Amino acid sequence: MRIVLLGAPGSGKGTQAKKLMAEKNIPQISTGDMLRAAVAAGSRFGVQAKKIMDAGNLVSDDIMLGIISERLSEPDTEDGFILDGFPRTEQQALDLSDLLDEMGKPLDCAVLMDVDFEILIKRLTGRRTCSLTGKLLNVYFSSQAELDACTDAGGELVQREDDNEEVIKNRLEVYRTQTEPVVSYYRKRGKLETVDADGTIDEVYGRFTRVLGIA
């Protein structure tokens, strides 16, 4: 099973990918993880990426595709992969399609984790971490008992600096303008599956595995 995972920040992509990876032994391959691993390993494209990053510049699509090619050549991807964080633009989607065809590993589908933007804003602006336990909570969705358990024990509900509403709305707008054309790209090619990603982790996972035909 070879899939690309799409969705806005806060849509639960990473959570669902990790759950699928644990249950079906399909590696989740995130752009950031791949980049760090390639740099640490000193691979051909990793060395090129390190020079660019050390100079404070963004890694080009060509080098990212090279890193993806290196990663997808590893034995653990023989039975499939979950690509998370790439492609982010329509051009990247076209280039990725060409690369995967060359490798004989074409995509089975792209899965969109679909959540209303108002819910995403609550998910992201409402995130808090208990200063005592490190447990991730949400002032909108966690029970009052869970929130009180942290504060009653003397902990604080800490909000990340970048989880304020202005930053979140900007991140979602960037997603809307840059990444939604990728959704259209896969839809036009009959490769898109959409999952209603509103609900509990297990509810969403049930829908996720159903669209993949492995429920």
Image: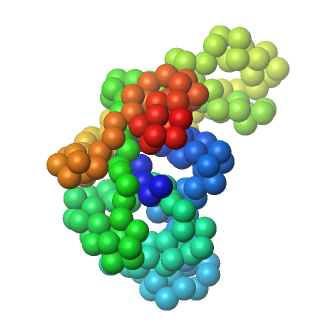
Return the residue nearer the eye: 63 or 161.
63
Return the residue nearer the eye: 9 or 17.
17
Q: Toward which corner of the image does residue 23 lie, by quadrant? A: top right
Q: Is residue 79 above or below residue 121?
A: below
Left or right, residue 6 beside residue 132: left
Q: Is residue 199 above or below residue 159?
A: above
Q: Residue furthest left?
A: 188
Q: Toward which corner of the image does residue 94 lie, by quadrant? A: bottom left
How is colour applied across the structure in the image?
A: rainbow
Residue at (76%, 26%) from the top-left corner?
155
Res. 131 in view: yes
The total of numbered circles placed on residues is 0
Tell me residue 67's x, y (percent). Answer: 46, 76
Q: Toward which corner of the image does residue 56 lie, by quadrant? A: bottom left
Tell me residue 198's x, y (percent). Answer: 44, 24
Q: Residue furthest top?
A: 144
Return the residue nearer the eye: 22 or 44.
22
Left or right, residue 164 beside residue 147: left
Residue at (27%, 72%) from the top-left corner?
98
Residue at (63%, 13%) from the top-left corner?
143
Residue at (55%, 18%) from the top-left corner?
141
Tell me residue 206's x, y (percent). Answer: 52, 30
Q: Is residue 142 above or below residue 8?
A: above
Res. 57 in view: no
Tell me residue 103's x, y (percent). Answer: 39, 76
Left or right, residue 93 beside residue 125: left
Q: Residue furthest right?
A: 153
